[in-house]
Every structure is written in structure tokens, then in C-alpha cells.
Image (spheres, helix red, strand yellow):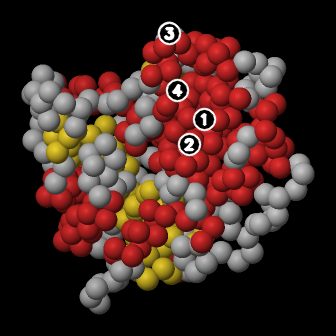
Amino acid sequence: MSPRAGQFDVASVLREVKMVRLEGLVRIRDLQLPLLRRAAVSVPGAVTDAWPVEVENLLRTAVSRLGGGDLQQAAELTLGLAPGMRDRAAADRRRLAAGVYSLSVERFRKSQEEMVLGQIAEQLCWLAGTGIRGTPPAGIALLAPHLQHRVLDLSRTRQPLRVVLHVHPVELLRGVDVVVSPSNTHLGLPEMYKASVSASLRRAAAVRDSAGDVIADPVNEDLMRWREEHGVLHRPAQAGTVAPTGPGALAQRGIRRIYHAAVAVPRPGTNDYDVTPQYVAGAAAHVLGLMTRERDAYTPPLRSVCFPLLGAGRGGLPPETSVSALWTAMAANTAPDHELHLIVRRPLVADLVVDVLGARPLPPEAAGPHPGEEKGQMCG
């Protein structure tokens, strides 16, 4: 872990983003923004008199990585990055951003605004933590600006076992047959504007018209049909249940199935969940078993599967506990022809995954061609 990356935590960066939201781009020079200034400079440690422009460019880069749609539009309006908005008052920018979600200003302020700013802060931490110059460390491949994957050797016996660890948002994944989406036992998808893995997948899988508006929500429709067919439309499923759906628009990225893994049990009367390592390991085992059963129904057969850290989001499970539980299932249930992938958003969490697994990073070329790789160009 680089010293530079460790200085950028989301909460601290979020405080500086909120200062920019309140005061606007035209007042950046008057603000105390030590983290944004440090992340923005082109040479570590150098701060030039043009630093407000550097910070603005950094913010524009972070917002451009939000994937388009309502989230990116609201972010651009909120910070004044949209055309003609840089000198608008904070109240005007908030009102226009609230209109993107068709919400009152007060409702937006209390809910979506925090999510929008939090997503910007996450991207800023990513950009700060992946400012790799020169030769990348062993086992890290730069896919596109600020996207990585790491090839990990997890062999414990004569049978080689390797995992590709992706370090980028899940909606940028491509070329993996099956993506696992965390869910609670009610198997209901969150709204598309949320920041979770399952919301990101729903958003990326939506079908849009030429203006970018959603015209179909195929993953949610598939999941509703599965729940009805299996008698869990009006009651929860058992923890560890896995519900398969089609990929919607993610088919354009080479994704062929989404497996919705019920690992979180809602606590009645609260917004909290119970997640155990047993739920995570059980769901992961069911994912691998289901992929084996569905394998030959597809041409070519299903082989690769990508897990996020199940239960480590709203479920509250520590990331290291989720990794250990996933590894338990992988080690016991992986078929010889399976290709295993893990995905996290932040480099610091990726470092934790490597440490917990006791993995040995390999040069990227050691794993051969990566899904989605064409003519030597990696795609996230």
C-alpha cells in the first residue's frame, strides 16, 4: 500500500467535496482543500498557483466515471460542472439536481444528495489511490485509466487455482459469464439511483433509448418472474438462495447471467440486516453449483464467474470475513474448468483481499488472455 493512497479516506474527501458544493467552483481558491489539492497535482508534492484548475479537472474526471444517467447529471449540476452552472448559487444547483430525480429540494437534500456526493468522493479516492506512474507493481495490470486487475495465485495443492481480482466499479466489468449480485432474502432489487452493487448492476443492465432514458428494466422483470415461479414473491427466501436472471444490456459487455445471492436477512422493524459467514459461503457454493448445472445450456459453456464481497456493504460484514467465507466455498466447490473472479471498488480493499487470502500476485500475462481482452488492450 502506498503512503500516498492511505491518506485519502472517503469521509475526509467527502467533507471537502461538500465544501465545493456549498461554495461553488468560482470560490475553490478560497477553500481549504488539502486532500483534493494533493490528489490533483500532476507531480506528487508539487502545488502550483493553478491548483484550483487542477482540482476542478480532478472533479470533472471523477464525475465522468459515474456512468452517465441521472447520477452523473445530478453530480454535474450539484457541483456546477454542467455548462453554464459554475457561478450559480448552491440553492439553484441543488434545485436543478433535485429535478433530475423528480424530488422536492428537501427530499433530495436528505437522501439523494448525500448519495451523489458520496459517489463522487468514492471516485476521487479511487483516482488518488491509483495514481500509478512508471512501471506498475507486480501482478497489477492497467486496463484503462485507473482500472486494474490483479492475478492471484491461490494454489494450495498440485491443482493450480488462480483468481482475477478486479479493482473497479462492477458496472465496468466485461467478458465474464456470470456476475453475482448481493441481495437480501426478499430478493428485491434496490432503485437504480442507489450506490450498491445490485443497484449498479440493475442500472447498467437497463435498456435505454437514444436520449439515455430507461425504457426497460429486464433484470428486475426476470427476478420478479423467478420469485413468482418459486413461491417467494410475497415471502422471503432462505438465506443462501441464488436466483438467476438474464443480463439485460450487460450482454453487450459479454455478461451472460446475473446470479442474485440472498445473503442478508432483514431485521424486522429496522433498516439493518443480519449476515453471517455461513450465509455467504452457502450462497457462493450455490452459485458455483448453479453455474455447473447451467453450464452446457449456453454456447460456449458458462465458465467464468465474478463475486463481489458478499455481505460487506449494507450487510455490515467485515470485508476480511466476507473474503474468508468466499474462499471457503471457492476452494471446496470450484470445478477444474471454472474461472474465478473477485471485484472490489477500491485499491485499499484489494490490498486487504490479497493479505487475507495469502495470495501471491502473478504477472498479468501469467493467466493468459483475460476475458474482454482484444489485441493487447485490456478492458475493465
At 27% from the left and 40% from the top, the residue drawn is 183
| Amino acid, disc 3 | Ser
Label 2 CA crowd tier, 10 Å (few <14, some 14–19, many 20+): many
| Amino acid, disc 4 | Glu
Q: In which quarter of the image is residue 156?
A: bottom left
| Amino acid, disc 1 | Lys
Label 2 with label 1: CB-CB less than 8 Å: yes
Label 3 with label 4: CB-CB less than 8 Å: no
* Disc with the residue nearer the chain's start (4 vs 2): 2
Q: How far apart are marks 3 and 4 (CA)?
A: 12 Å
- Give the residue number, with chain letter if any, for mark 4: 113
Which type of secondary structure does the marked residue at label 1 adopt?
Answer: helix
Across and down, in percent, residue 334 comes to: 25, 68
The residue lying toward the viewer, choosing from 359 and 63, is: 63
Report the quarter where the N terminus lies: bottom right
- Give the residue number, with chain letter if any, for mark 3: 104
- Give the residue number, with chain letter if any, for mark 1: 18
Q: Distance between the residues labelled 1 and 4?
A: 10 Å
75 vs 120: above or below:
above
Left or right: where does residue 336 sit relative to residue 128? left
- Give the residue number, with chain letter if any, for mark 2: 14
* Disc with the residue nearer the chain's start (3 vs 4): 3
Label 4 CA crowd tier, 10 Å (few <14, some 14–19, many 20+): many
Q: Is residue 65 visible?
A: no
Across and down, in percent, residue 210 comes to: 64, 21
Q: Nearer the viewer, mark 1 or mark 4?
A: 1
Which type of secondary structure does the marked residue at label 4 adopt?
Answer: helix
* Disc with the residue nearer the chain's start (1 vs 4): 1
